[in-house]
Amino acid sequence: MMKKILLGTMVAATLGVGSVSVANADVFVRVAPPPPRTEVVPEPRRGYVWVPGYWDYRGNRHIWVQGTWVRERHGYHYAQPRWHERDGRWVLERGHWAHGHADNDHDGVPNRFDSHPNNPRRD
């Protein structure tokens, strides 16, 4: 009886770990996401960062996830979710906290030194 309980516990723990790692994995699909929706950004909140909405992919279709406030983490910036094309497939990089300085347009120039921080073609 004890062996069955121990085995059941081990299987449940293994399944739980597997689902956590899948939830954080990048998403690869063949269908491009729709254009981003326009959202009204609320007034700034002290101690919080606004994370804009984005298209996620669930149940074989794109669904819109509305923007939200997340508690600020000092020394980090929030890298928002973004889609990009790779080898004929679309990849969703999940949003996450990154250490260091923000670089919105991913051109290698931190926002604080970038005269056009949302345009990857200009410094």
Image (cartoon, rainbow, N blue to C red):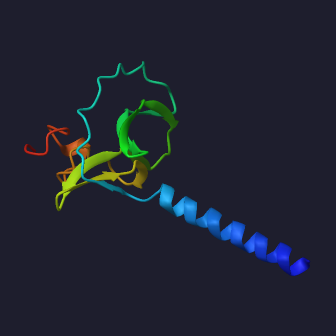
Q: Is residue 103 left or right of residue 13?
A: left
Q: Position of residue 75 (x, y in %)?
A: 44, 50
Residue at coordinates 61% horizontally, 66% vertically from top-left?
17
Q: Quadrant of residue 27?
A: bottom left
Q: Is residue 111 left or right of residue 25?
A: left
Front residue of 61/101: it is 61
Q: Position of residue 95 (x, y in %)?
A: 40, 47
Q: Is residue 19 left or right of residue 9?
A: left
Residue at coordinates 13% horizontally, 45% vertically from top-left?
120
Residue at coordinates 56% horizontally, 66% vertically from top-left?
18
Q: Is residue 71 left or right of residue 57?
A: right
Farthest bottom residue? 3
Number of disc labels: 0
Farthest left residue? 121
Residue 11 in the image: above or below residue 31: below
Front residue of 79/22: it is 22
Quarter containing the N terminus? bottom right
Residue at coordinates 47% horizontally, 57% vertically from top-left?
24
Front residue of 104/88: it is 88
Residue 90 in the image: above or below residue 4: above
Q: Position of residue 12 (x, y in %)?
A: 71, 66
